[in-house]
Amino acid sequence: MKEKLTNYLIDLVKINSVIGNEKEIADYVEKFLKDKVKNIIRLNNSLIAFNDLEQNKKTIGFVGHLDTVPAENDLTGQIIDNKLYGLGASDMKGGLAVMMGLLDFFKDKESRFNTIYIFYEKEEGAYNDNGLQPLLEEYKDLLQNIDFAFVLEPTNNEVQVGAVGTINVEINFKGKKSHSARPWYGENAIHKSWKFIKRVSEFGVKEYPFKFSLGDKDIEITFYEVMNITVAKSEGARNVIPDNFKLNVNYRFSPSKTLEEAKKDIIDIVENEAEIDFVDLAPPGKVPTNNPILIDFIKRYSIPVKPKQAWTDVARLSIFGIEGVNFGPGEPSQAHQRNEYIPIENLVKNFEYLKDFLLV
């Protein structure tokens, strides 16, 4: 299977699927699925693949996005020191290759679970454009059969539970233009922001501990809240006092908070000094507790359990009542990097864990 997994991934990384350009890779996956499963659903450039669901079996979902961020890779499809290079190799075409490997392996073998495979578009962009959302809405009755989901985002074969929520908000400071030689006739919008910038810079790292239950014991994990200014924009000539200054603030917040509570954190730190425009809001992912499928999986293989200190579609699934975790072969540190790669042994190991878990 190592050779098959490697070849699947080479094919995948050679297909350009930068967000918004997923048709070719969706066509490739759809063609692959033709003799692997009984049922294939396609919505735009997203796919659901499954066999008829048996009532006496629990159902596991395997979830992966088809798109990548824009980036460069000079070594696409090459294997160097047992690492396979290509845009998306870790994030997350390695996970897609594992999903394809499982579909191929179980096309003529019995599984102790029903399985539903979801390949979807537009994960790497704005929350509201994400291709998983239309699938969850259109095929809710089917997908809510999933008792537990593995989202194969890069985790280096660790189980990563939950997901921090994320907010991008534009903070707009207003002033008045004047000639920079006579600033007393104006009001410098950039200068007005310094107290706010100081408060954000002093936000620090706030710890939020969680206890994760394995039935007979608890595992303690910690999520971290952070707030950072990521973009600053002002327009005008070099000899003009600016009347407008915009800052983008990125806030990653604990799964213990709601979106409304996180928005209030932003409002409080602005202290009425500027206008606030919430431009992108993604809720946190639920930390699953006492899910028997997850407990069985972790105990069976003694896999490390960590918090997901990022946002993934585990959060979107949880809104629809589907519990899941991130568990994928990719290297998180390789995500969105130039000359991205994945260790081939990670690919094989992830496949073996999941294959063995599904076997009767």
Image: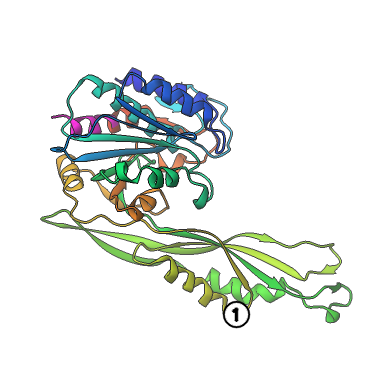
Q: Main secondary structure of the magenta part?
A: helix
User: Of helix, strand and loop, which one carries label 1?
Assistant: loop
Q: Give the total of numbered labels.
A: 1
Between 190 and 141, the one lying in front of the other is 141
**Residue bearing mark 1:** 272
State the image coordinates of residue 358 (x, y, percent, origin top left): 19, 32
Placement of 186 over or under 19, stated as above or below: below
Position above or below: 22 against 306: above
> As drawn, is 335 to the left or to the right of 289?
right
Residue located 18% across and 43% down the image: 302
Percent of width and height locating residue 44: 49, 35
Boundaries of the magenta span: 351-360
- From this viewpoint, is residue 296 visible? yes
Give the amino acid at mark 1.
Answer: Asn
Which residue is situated farthest in the left direction here? 216
Percent coordinates x, y for residue 127 in the rendering: 49, 52
Taking the spot 39% from the left edge, 66% from the top edge, the residue there is 258
Q: Is residue 82 left or right of residue 339?
A: left
Q: Is residue 353 magenta?
A: yes
Quadrant location, the C terminus: top left
Residue at figure coordinates x 53%, y 29% from the top left: 23
